Image: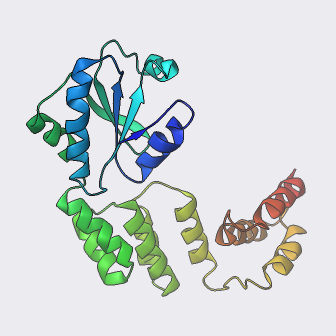
Amino acid sequence: MIDVTEQDFNAQVVEKSHEVPVVVDLWAPWCGPCKTLGPLLEKIIDDQEGKVVGVKIDVDANPAISEAFQVQSIPMVIAFKDGKPVDGFMGAQGEPIIRDFIAKLLPSKEQTELESLVALGDEISLRAALDIESDHEPAVTALAEILVNDGRIDEGLALLRKVPESAQTRRISALARTSESPVDADEVEVELADLLEKVKDDDEARQRFVDLLEVMGADDPRTPGWRKKLSMALF
């Protein structure tokens, strides 16, 4: 259990909970039940071998956090996952209740297998992942990209319809549309410059321009500049 303050709460709790569940123990030095709960909570969290992180927050020293959680009595325990509070309890609980509370935060055997298959990233593993969860977004997009790059365009695009639109699905759809005339990374800016003169009146040129930007991706430092040029050319 590490001590957290108002200054590092976001980094140590909110952001960290995107990687692993974080259990927040709200306590104060004068609180007798806190002294019973704290060591027990720490022991159970240590037993998880890094699958759960525990933090302690002194509510007296961090009144803004106490106010944010509307703390009326302590000890108070709150669990965070994916940047949000998902569960909690009040008062000094016994070991069976705490272990059950922690167990609910851990991924199931099925979820662990799913994540392992997606991490492998090959077609067979990704198809096995989708057998477990047919609309698992990371598996869907990873497999769709493999299919599109392999020329199985229709199958890849059909797969994408299982998940909501995102930057990743738009990029893969753009890859599919440009598959007959692939993007040359070294010549892409030459093509963009040529298309820029046509985008206002030519729908095909405009779509090709947008697709090139999607394939380049938001992380490409050239993309923002070309998006701005497109906006200026259109309006």
As drawn, 24 above or below 70? below
Image point (83%, 65%), residue name: 199
Q: Is residue 19 visible?
A: yes
Q: Is residue 217 toward the left or the right of residue 157 in the image?
A: right
Name the residue located 40 percent from the left edge and 61 percent from the top edge. Answer: 137
Q: Position of residue 100 (x, y in %)?
A: 14, 41
Residue 158's image quarter? bottom left
Nearest the viewer among 227 and 97 is 97
**Could you say where residue 133 lies in the image, as x and y percent from the top left?**
26, 62
Task: Residue 213 in the image: state x and y as whole percent.
Answer: 72, 67
Query: Quick check: can you spot residue 90?
Result: no
Q: Nearer the viewer, residue 7 or 205?
A: 7
Residue furthest to the top: 72
Res 159 → quadrant: bottom left
Tell me where residue 23 sits by quadrant.
Answer: top left
Residue 4: % across, % down: 46, 36
User: Residue at coordinates 49% horizontally, 46% vertically from top-left?
Assistant: 15
The mark total stands at: 0
Residue 78, compared with residue 235, is above or below; it is: above
Which corner quadrant holds the N terminus? top left
Q: Is residue 5 above or below residue 60?
A: below
Q: Residue at x 83, y 77 (%)?
A: 189
* Image side of residue 43 versus residue 68, left or right: left
In this view, 74 is above or below 123: above
